[in-house]
Amino acid sequence: MDTRLLGSSDLHITPVGFGAWAIGGSGWQFAWGGQDDRDSIATIREALDAGVNWIDTAAVYGLGHSEEIVARALDGVPIRPYVFTKCSMVWDKRRKIGHSLKAQSIRRECEASLRRLKVDAIDLYQIHWPDPDEDIEEGWTAMAALQSEGKVRHIGVSNFNVAQMKRAQLIAPITSLQPPYSLLHREIEAEILPFVTQEKIGVIAYSPMASGLLTGAMTRERIAGLPADDWRKEHADFREPWLSRNLELVNVLRAIGERHGRAPGEVAVAWVLRNPVVTGAIVGARRPGQARGISGAAAFRLNPGELAEIWASFTRKAA
C-alpha cells in the first residue's frame, strides 16, 4: 500500500488507518454496543496484514479499554504500526465524561495512555475537542511541552475550526487536523480544507463511512435493532427525514461498487480519499473480514462519471 507524508512530520501513513473507537466496547456514553475483545485483536492484526500502518484511538474510547486492546493486539507484532491517540475527554469515578484542556490534566492523560499502550512515546498525540475554548492556549502549550520532552513525537488537533488552529499555531506548529468528512458531512470543504492546504497541515478524516451508515450493511431493520447503548440510535443521520436520502445514496454506492467488485463502504472511503488535501481516512472495523475488504479503498479510484452519479444522489433533498 502506498503512503503519504502527514503534514510536515516524518510520518508516512497509508491512505487508510484502523479506527479503534468501536472496539472500546460497551458501558460508556459514546459506545457502539458490546464488542468481543478477541474479535478486536484479530481484526487489528488483519488490518496490519493488509498493509495498514497506523491505528487511531483515544483515551476516552471505552474509558481506556480501546488503548489496552490496541496494546494487546500489537504485542509481538514484528513491524509495529504508528499509534495515534487523543486527550481532553476525561471521566470521573462514576464514568461521567467531561472535557479538560488544563496542563496538568493533559499530562496525566498522556502518562496514562503511555501505560495503557505500553509504548515509550506516542507517534501522534491529538487534542480530541477544543473544549473549553478558553483553555486552548494552555492545552496546546502542554502538548508542545510533551513533544519537547519526547513523550510524544508529533502533536495534532481534532474538531478544531480555523480560528482555533490559528491560535494554536502561535504557540507551536500543528502536524495534523482530524475532522469529520464524508459524503454526508462536507462542512470542512468551505474554509478548513483551504486553510490546512495553505499551512501544510495534514488531514486525517474520521467517519468516512458516516459511522457505518454508508457501508451497505446498515438497513432500517438493523438501525431499529441497534443496542440501547449505541449512540447512533439518536443521531440525525440515522433518523428521518435524512435516513431515506442516506439509504438511497447507499444504493448508488452499491451499484458503483458492483461494477468493480467493491463494497459500498469502499466506494464511500474512496470518495473521501479522492480529495488531494486528505492525507488519510480512519476506517473502523469490528470483526475479522471487515478490515481487509475496506483496505481496498486505498487503491480504488472513482471516475468522473461515477463522481457525478454520487453527487446527483447526494444533492437530492430528503422527502
Image (cartoon, rainbow, N blue to C red):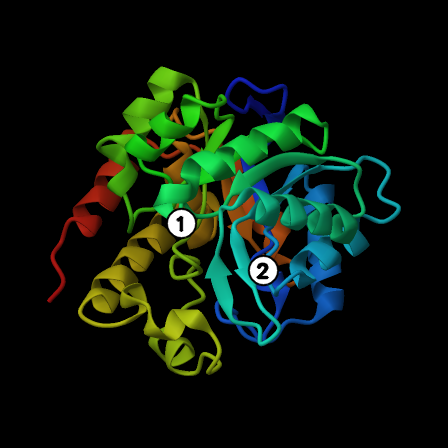
Q: Residue 230 location, x and y as percent?
A: 47, 74
- Please provide percent x and percent y for residue 10: 63, 19
Residue at position x 60%, y 46% in the image: 104
Q: Is residue 106 left or right of residue 50?
A: left
Q: Secondary structure at mark 1?
A: loop
| Residue located 39% across and 76% down the image | 223
The answer for how far apart the CA atoms under marks 1 and 2 are is 17 Å
Q: Quadrant of the C terminus?
A: bottom left
Q: Which disc is residue 319 wearing? A: none
Q: Quadrant of residue 143?
A: top right
Q: Residues within 10 Å of mark 2 (few under 14, many from 20)?
A: many
Tell me the amino acid under the disc marked 1: Asp
Res. 18 visible in picture: no
> Which residue is denoted by mark 2 in the rendering?
61
Q: Is residue 297 above or below residue 132?
A: above
CB contact under 8 Å: marks 1 and 2 = no
**Image position, residue 238 (x, y; %):** 31, 69
Locate the N terminus by quadrant.
top right
Bin the neighbour count of mark 1 within 10 Å (Cα to Cα): few under 14, some 14-19, many 20 and up.
some
Q: Can residue 71 be seen from the camera position used here? A: yes
Disc 1 marks which residue? 131
Task: Give 7 or 284, whichever is nearer the viewer.
Answer: 7
Numbered disc total: 2
Residue situated in front as seen by the camera: 57 or 145:
145
Q: Nearer the viewer, residue 168 or 190?
A: 168
Residue at (74%, 45%) from the top-left corner? 114
Residue 286 lies, with reference to residue 54, above or below; the image says below
